Amino acid sequence: MADKKRPLQPGNTAPAFELATANFDGTVSLADLSGRPFLIGFFRGLHCPFCRRQLEQLAGIEPTLNAAGVKTVAVINTPVERARLYFRHRPTPVTLLCDPDCRTHRAYGVPHAEFQPDGSSEPPEWPYTATMAQFQAARINPTGEFPEPLQPMEANTILNAKDRFELDEADQAIFAKHATQLVGHFLVDQNGTIAWAQMEALDGPSSLCIFPTAAEIIAAVGELAR
């Protein structure tokens, strides 16, 4: 049965967590981040090229957010050993945390879609349940890299080839278990209260991989300062 916990909203208290870091040794917890605002994004694993692109965008605006007193954190659905190997060659100023089981994604209510069995009489309830036909009919081109919108899995395959990213055994295992995990962004204030939230594709699978822009994130941080 799909977990239908609703995404946390502004005014909710940010749930506690403690996760291993990919770009330095040790762990980072909510307690470690307390006392200053932080932006936290919950992503699919490294197998998702759109998530990798969003991480690059976050890295690009990290100096701006840091100057505003906001720390930038990303939780990726990848085992820490795999993530450390990848980011050793692609250093980033973003604090990268690893959650191969998506437990923190669940705690913050970031949806994970499940496919209904063939012949099910239950109506799909996106973003929690979907039919395979519904997903197969989706077409996306969120970064404008394709001449026309493509089916999401085809889009992933093409961009991974373009990036020369080959899924290893750890990536394959995460993809098999968490391929339909959605992405969420939260801005948490210095008191640990969510001030802004954005979820991926709440209106349907054709909105997959559309994430907040740099301008939208910076505007949300600006509102926090008022």
Image: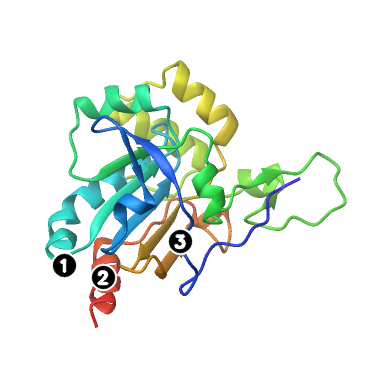
Q: Residue at x 67, y 50 (%)?
A: 134
Name the secondary structure under disc 2: helix
Q: Which residue is mark 1?
A: 68
Residue 6 lies, in percent from the top left, at 61, 62
64 or 193: which is nearer to us? 193
Residue 33 lies, in percent from the top left, at 30, 54
Q: Residue at x 35, y 61 (%)?
A: 212
Would residue 123 be visible to someone looking at this image? yes
Identify the amino acid type marked 1.
Ala
Please report contact status of discs 3 and 1: CB closer than 8 Å, yes or no: no
Which class describes the residues within 10 Å of circle 1: few (<14), some (14-19), or many (20+)? Answer: some
Q: Residue at x 28, y 78 (%)?
A: 223
Name the secondary structure under disc 1: loop
Name the secondary structure under disc 3: loop
Left or right: 153 with respect to 82?
A: right
Closer to the N terminus: mark 3 or mark 1? Answer: 3
Q: Which residue is mark 3?
A: 14
Q: Nearer the viewer, mark 3 or mark 1?
A: 3
Q: CA distance from mark 3 to mark 1?
A: 20 Å
Closer to the N terminus: mark 3 or mark 2? Answer: 3
As drawn, the label of residue 192 is none
Q: CA distance from mark 3 to mark 2?
A: 17 Å
